[in-house]
Amino acid sequence: MMTRFIDTAKRKLAIWLRQGISPRRLALTLALGFAIGCFPVVGVTSGVCFLVAIALRLNLPAIQAANWFAMPMQVALIVPFVHLGRKLIGFGPGQPVEVGALLHSSPAVILARMGSLTGQAMLAWLVVAIPMVALITLILTKVLRHIPAVAAAESGG
């Protein structure tokens, strides 16, 4: 099963490379897809990847594959992003969310609290995502240049 997955991945990579994707452009596409896949708002990453791919003329299947690969991390990173965002904003340790008390609050209070937590998580994601995309792009570019089919795509052959 794993061999079949690897063979399929190799075939898809070869197809993407035949579309004229250089190692740097493919690396950037995968890095952006992975970073967007970690965005702390569930349910929006595929659409965001689609828009980014269209706007930057990136390979749509490659960015979506990286996005889907990162999705398990998305949920796992929400709480750390909220904590980091809280520290970045300067709220200090803050008060933990009391789910029981929140359930007895008005919808306006619930929305305000959830909006605050989401904003903190999004700020932290942005602070982490920018250097992460740069680092992943650099590393993947070097790795992809060692793959003969990718090196040929870069040299135009």
Image (cartoon, grey):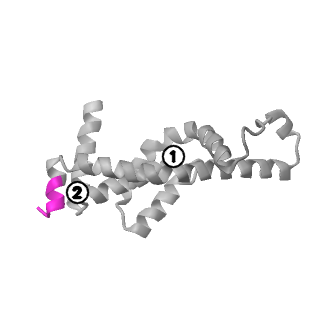
In the image, residue 153 lies in the stretch drawn in magenta: yes
- Of badges 2 and 1, the one in the foreground is 1
Residue 149 or residue 154, whichever sits in front? 154
Residue 48 seen from this side? yes
Dominant secondary structure (helix, strand or loop) of the stretch shown in magenta: helix
Residue 62 seen from this side? no
Circles 2, 1 touching at the beta carbon (< 8 Å) = no
Identify the image quadrant of the C terminus: bottom left
Residue at x 28%, y 43% (from the top left corner): 9
In the drawing, does residue 144 fall left or right of residue 71? left
Identify the image quadrant of the N terminus: top left
Q: Amino acid at mark 2?
A: Leu
Mark 2 falls on what kind of element?
helix
Q: What x and y, as percent, mark residue 41?
A: 60, 49
The number of numbered discs placed on residues in the rendered structure image is 2
Magenta-tinted stretch: 151-157
Question: Picture quarter containing residue 17?
Answer: bottom left
Which residue lies under the disc numbered 1?
A: 38
Q: What x and y, as percent, mark residue 20?
A: 22, 63
Above or below: residue 96 compared with residue 149: above
Q: What x and y, as percent, mark residue 32?
A: 42, 54
Find the residue positioned furthest to the top: 1
Q: Amino acid at mark 1?
A: Cys
Above or below: residue 52 compared with residue 149: below
Above or below: residue 16 compared with residue 95: below
Q: CA distance from mark 2 to mark 1?
A: 25 Å
In the image, residue 11 lies in the stretch drawn in magenta: no
Label drawn at residue 27: none
In the drawing, does residue 14 fall left or right of residue 134? left
Which residue lies under the disc numbered 2?
A: 17
Residue at x 66%, y 44% (from the top left corner): 87
